[in-house]
Amino acid sequence: MGSGRVDRGRVRRVRDRLRAVYGRPVAPPHGHPIAELVLTVLSQSTSDRNRDVAYLRLRARFPTWEEIRDAPNDEVEAAIRPGGISRVKSVRIQQILAELGGAGGTVSLDHLPELPVEEARAELMALPGVGRKTAACVLLFAFGMRDVPVDTHVSRVGSRLGFLTPGPFERMHDEMLALTPRGQELELHVNLLRHGRRTCHARTPDCGNCALLRLCPFGYNLRRND
């Protein structure tokens, strides 16, 4: 369907029903963009717990970003091994830090809030392996800038609700951002993600116990055809 034809009133009703189930998440911008960037790289294809263990091990072993950048790769890989795919992730993290800090320079992204969102996003996406979702995580969670990460859960729930057009994630990010009420980027992202994890599963969605059933074309058709 796509955001151009989405009923904004239905978006608000979905927001309100998710809020009734999961609450209204509050996470003030933490102001640590490099940490958010590295956490997002570590989160790929693993659990939140394993991601956090890998991150804490990495920071305990290397207290500064510059030390991580300049360390032997096998030491970085060993530190993040609990997060899985450590060889690929260690190379990617060091490539990103090298790009940000150059040869011997200070690694920083603290200037991003001074830029328009589009420019800040483009700067992040120019880094090795950084896509739209990772850039959105940094902008939203580190600085509270207007962007909405679309991961597999958000894309699945949003597509089933008819908010997003299945296809390239770049387009889904644009659609999600367009339909999200200003100031509610974090709430919609977090609660759609929670709903995807707990109820709107990929293979066997629990439509019978879904708070969004009456607002969901996918769930309505699925139940009707049972």
Image (cartoon, helix red, strand yellow):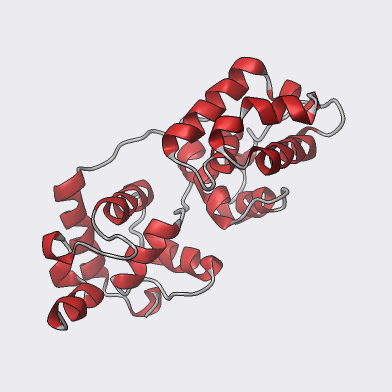
> With respect to residue 207, does 55 lie above or below?
above
> With respect to residue 5, does 85 lie above or below?
above
> With respect to residue 61, does 124 lie above or below?
below
The residue depicted at 70 percent of the width and 39 percent of the height is: 87
The residue depicted at 78 percent of the width and 24 percent of the height is: 71
Residue 48 in the image, given as x and y percentages of width and height: 43, 37
Front-lying residue, 98 or 186:
98
Question: Is residue 197 shown left or right of residue 119?
Answer: left
Question: Is residue 218 shown left or right of residue 147?
Answer: left
Front-lying residue, 122 or 203:
203
- The count of marks equals 0
Question: Is residue 151 shown left or right of residue 204?
Answer: right
Residue 127 in the image, given as x and y percentages of width and height: 72, 48
- Which quadrant is home to the N terminus? bottom left
- Which quadrant is home to the C terminus? bottom left
Decide if residue 92 is in sight here. yes
